[in-house]
Each structure stands twice: as structure tokens, then as C-alpha cells.
């Protein structure tokens, strides 16, 4: 695993360990294998065969190595997005969609998300079997998605250390995949020695996943999993979960005094705390319409965006990539609770003007 990526997800791995330890102290996992329909097993088996064949090609070997060496959640997500739309994975989503549309009896729970990622052992002082990747909405895989990280203690599990591709189908939307699961290793296709996991949540079938590292000799192990999910923007470029810092402010209100052109600006902003190398986008996708007309409800935007920082944060206001203004809030600016900054930008003969108000929380 790339050290930079490992560092990014380390706090989340610790959180998963905490949740699993807390749950273990109050109850024991009581996993049972949900009945996964033969038809769904067949679809997953064919998907796994295509992935294994792809992994055996020079192109597949190179891309798998790149996936394993991703330096961030955003980097891994971008690579997985490409794989989703490839002829390796697309037949899987197409086949699922066709079966669901035909209302086949073989699929007996509503599939709302597809997951694609990597799975294997990670040592954080205690063994964790972790899976991580990108979950997309089904049957519209590019409508919405979320990065997921799931883990179970490896104690009692006969699992190797190989990191391999995992693909699955789930009964929850991508952003609803978080929480506890009871999981059990199952045989997906004994004719080719393909294993995977079935999952229950609240005593209901929650999903099934094929792990290309699990074979005919595996199966029957039970474990409790805990999953975290977080959103990435539509381009997968900017993270959402902020790094810890000493202070936090709320960007309360953005007000438009003069737009770039007549009508509305379609705005979003980027913020970078303390001159660091991590920049965040808000909204995480799309934009907000702004008007200079004080009678227009879109004259002001109550953003409510929290920002963690140590000494200062820089903000860049944009419309389709064009800069509308910049702001800097310093810790020393906050003699009271709120500060308002103004940005003027000349665009030809036009003067673009916005104000941003921030409130210091701590």
C-alpha cells in the first residue's frame, strides 16, 4: 500500500478498530450466511472470471499495480471509475440491470449500490481485514457514489495477505453503506473455486461481495464488519473529510454585490487551510446560483461550511473554473466572533464583487 494513502486512511482504520472493539465488548458476532440466489451468484461469478482474465493481461497487471499503489482515496476512485466503465466491469452492471428490470426471481433483495475496490490484510497493531474502494449507485453508476472503507478483525479468519480486487452488490445506497455488518465467507462458484462474503445488517440481507483472493479452500469463517463511507466530489479530485486542526470556523454567508455578467453566477469555492497541499471543494459537486439583486433570494448564500485550520485559510471563488474572487481569513482577524471580507475582481470593464462572512467556533 502506498504510504501516503495509508497515512490518509489511518485515522479511519483506527476508528473502525474502536467500533469493532466496542462492539466486541458488548456482544459477540452472530453471523449467518444469508441465502444468496443462484442467479446473483452466477452474475458475480462471471464478473470475477472477467476480472481474473483481465488481471492476466499486461494491461490488467499494470492497472492492478497502479490501483494498489494509489496515493489517495481520490486517486484510487478515479482509477476505479475508469474500470467501472470498461468492458471488464460494465457487462456486470449491464447484466444486473437487465435481470433486475426483468424482475427475475433470482434477485430477492433490492440492489441499490455496486462496490468495486481492493481487499486484504492490514496491520495496525492488530490484524484488520480491510476492503476499500468506490461504491456507485445502481442502476445509475455515475449519478452518485461514495468512497468506502470496511474492516473486520482477522483473529480466527483464515485469510492470506494478498491484496485483491473485490466486487459486490448491496441493498443500500452508497452513502448508506456505513455501520455494522455480520459477515460470513461463502462459496460463490465451487466449479471454479471462487469465494466471497455474504452480509446481514439488522437481520436483513445487506449484500454480497466476491473477493478474488478467496478460493475453494476458504469459506465458513464468520466476522463482524464495520464500514465507513464518505463522499468525494463528482471529479474525484477533492477530498471531503478534513484533516485535524487547532481551530475551526464556519463560512456562514456569501453575498453577491456584482456578478460577472448580467443574470446569475453559478459559483462554488475551494478552500486551502494554512497553505497546505490539501484543497477542498464546496459544494462537493455542482454549484450555487448567485444574483446581485438584493431582492432575489439568491443574493446571499448561507453556506454553513465548517473549515478546520491552524492559522489561516485561503478561499477561491469560481464560476466554471473562472475566478470570481479570493479571500483569506486569519486567526488574528477574529477579535469578535464574526469577520466579513470583501473581494473585488476586474473582468474587463466589469467589477465582480462578493463578500464572505465567517464565524470562529474555537
Image: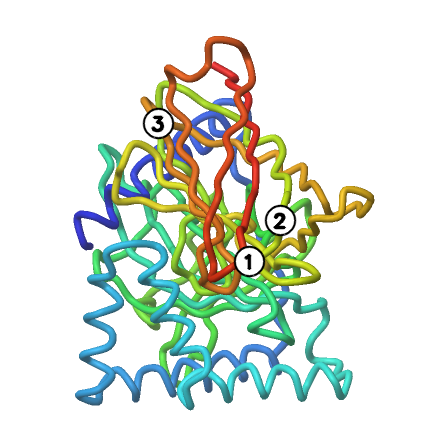
Q: Where does residue 7 sit, x and y in percent of width and height?
A: 24, 41
Q: Distance from label 1 to label 3 (Cα)? A: 24 Å
Q: Note whether residue 31 is visible.
A: no
**On screen, residue 166 above or below 332:** below
Residue 312 is marked as 3
Q: Where residue 26 appears, x then y in whole percent?
A: 54, 23
Q: Please, what secondary structure does the residue beneath circle 3 have?
A: strand
**Closer to the camera in the image, 67 or 41:** 67
**The label number, if any, that marks residue 285 in the structure image:** 1
Q: Residues within 10 Å of mark 3 (few under 14, many from 20)?
A: some
> How many discs mark residues in the rendered view?
3
Question: Residue at position x 23%, y 56% from top?
Answer: 71
- How many residues crowd mark 1 within 10 Å: few (<14), some (14–19), many (20+)? some
- Image quadrant where one finds the N terminus: bottom left
Residue at the image point whose x is 40% and y is 44% from the top: 152
Task: Specify which label sits upstream in the sequence, 1 or 2.
Answer: 2
Q: Are marks 1 and 2 in contact (CB under 8 Å)?
A: no
Q: Residues within 10 Å of mark 2 (few under 14, many from 20)?
A: many
What residue did someone put label 2 on? 258
Amino acid at each position: 500500500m502506498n504510504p501516503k494513502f495509508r497515512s490518509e486512511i489511518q485515522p479511519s482504520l483506527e476508528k473502525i478498530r474502536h467500533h469493532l472493539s466496542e462492539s466486541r465488548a458488548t456482544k459477540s458476532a452472530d453471523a449467518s450466511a444469508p441465502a444468496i440466489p443462484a442467479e446473483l451468484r452466477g452474475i458475480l461469478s462471471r464478473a470475477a472470471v472477467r476480472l481474473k482474465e483481465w488481471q492476466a493481461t499486461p494491461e490488467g497487471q499494470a492497472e492492478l499495480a497502479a490501483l494498489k499503489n494509489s496515493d489517495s482515496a481520490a486517486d484510487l476512485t478515479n482509477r476505479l471509475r475508469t474500470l467501472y466503465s470498461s468492458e471488464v466491469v460494465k457487462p456486470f452492471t449491464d447484466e444486473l440491470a437487465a435481470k433486475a428490470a426483468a424482475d427475475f426471481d433470482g434477485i430477492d433483495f433490492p440492489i441499490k449500490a455496486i462496490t468495486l475496490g481492493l481487499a486484504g490484510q492490514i496491520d495496525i497493531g492488530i490484524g484488520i481485514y480491510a476492503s476499500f474502494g468506490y461504491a456507485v449507485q445502481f442502476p445509475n453508476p455515475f449519478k452518485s457514489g461514495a468512497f468506502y472503507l470496511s474492516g473486520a478483525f482477522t483473529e480466527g479468519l483464515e485469510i492470506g495477505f494478498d491484496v485483491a480486487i473485490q466486487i459486490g452488490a448491496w441493498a443500500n445506497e452508497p452513502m448508506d453503506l456505513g455501520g455494522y455488518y455480520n459477515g460470513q465467507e461463502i462459496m460463490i462458484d465451487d466449479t471454479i473455486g471462487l469465494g466471497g462474503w455474504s452480509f446481514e445488517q439488522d437481520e436483513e440481507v445487506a449484500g454480497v461481495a466476491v473477493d478474488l483472493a478467496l478460493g475453494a479452500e476458504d469459506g465458513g469463517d464468520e466476522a463482524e464488519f464495520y464500514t465507513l463511507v464518505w463522499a468525494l466530489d463528482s471529479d474525484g479530485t477533492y477530498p471531503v473529510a478534513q484533516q485535524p486542526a487547532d481551530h475551526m470556523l464556519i463560512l456562514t454567508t456569501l453575498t453577491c454585490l456584482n456578478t460577472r455578467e448580467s443574470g446569475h453566477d453559478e459559483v462554488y469555492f475551494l478552500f486551502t487551510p494554512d497553505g497546505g497541499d490539501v484543497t477542498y471543494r464546496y459544494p462537493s459537486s455542482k454549484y450555487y446560483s448567485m444574483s446581485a439583486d438584493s431582492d432575489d433570494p439568491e443574493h446571499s448564500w448561507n453556506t454553513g461550511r465548517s473549515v478546520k485550520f491552524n492559522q489561516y485559510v485561503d478561499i477561491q471563488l469560481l464560476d466554471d473554473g473562472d475566478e470570481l474572487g479570493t479571500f483569506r481569513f486569519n486567526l488574528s482577524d477574529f477579535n469578535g466572533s464574526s469577520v466579513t471580507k470583501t473581494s473585488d475582481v476586474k473582468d474587463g470593464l466589469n467589477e465582480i464583487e462578493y463578500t464572505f462572512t465567517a464565524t470562529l467556533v474555537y
